[in-house]
Image (spheres, helix red, strand yellow):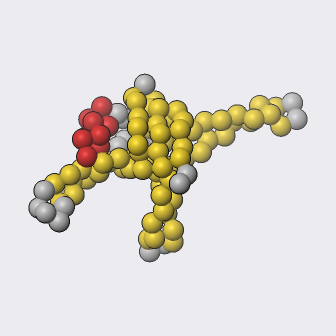
Amino acid sequence: MRYCTDIGYFATDPKLHEIEKVDGSKTYVCRFRLVFNKSRRHRDENIKEADFFSFVVWDTAAEYIYNNAKKGDQIFVNAEAKTRETDSGTEVFFRVNRFELL
C-alpha cells in the first residue's frame, strides 16, 4: 500500500454525495482536490511548482469536511493511494484515513 502524509490546500470546494448501501441505509462520500506547493532551485532561480491530487473521504468525516472546509483552506491529511478504472482510463486518487483542518 502507498500512503501520503502532507499538508495541502483545498483546490476546490468539497462535494458531498449521498450513497445508498445494499441494506438500504445511507452514507456520505466527499470528494475534493488538494494542491501541494513546492519550490526548487534551478541555477540561481527559485522555481515554484504545484501538484494537484484527488481525495475521497467517507461517512461522518465526509459530512464534517463538507460543512467545515472550502477552497483555499489548509488541511493535514494522511491517505492511502487507490486506483479505479474509468471510461477514460485508470484514475489514481487518495482515500483519507486521518485529517485535521488547519
Residue 19 position by quadrant: bottom left
Report the side of 43 relative to 69 (left or right): right
Q: Which residue lies furthest to the top in this view?
A: 102
Q: 67 or 62: which is nearer to us?
A: 62
Picture residue at 44% right of the left edge, 71% below the top: 86
Q: 48 or 19: which is nearer to us?
A: 19
Where is residue 43 drawn, in percent x and y?
A: 88, 35
Q: Residue furthest left?
A: 24
Q: Residue furthest bottom?
A: 87
- Answer whether residue 30 is visible to the viewer in this image: yes
Number of labelled discs? Answer: 0
Where is residue 10 drawn, in percent x and y?
A: 44, 38
Picture residue at 75% right of the left edge, 35% below the top: 40
- Answer whether residue 9 is visible to the viewer in this image: no
Picture residue at 48% right of the left edge, 49% below the top: 80
Where is residue 8 drawn, in percent x and y?
A: 51, 35
Looking at the rendered image, the quarter that the C terminus falls into is top left
Residue 70 position by quadrant: top left
Q: Which residue lies furthest to the right in this view?
A: 43
Report the side of 69 relative to 41 (left or right): left
Look at the picture and state if 6 lies above or below 102: below
Q: 84 or 17: which is nearer to us?
A: 84
Picture residue at 53% right of the left edge, 47% below the top: 3
Report the side of 91 relative to 27 (left or right): right
Look at the picture and state if 28 lies above or below 50: below
Where is residue 79 drawn, in percent x and y?
A: 47, 45
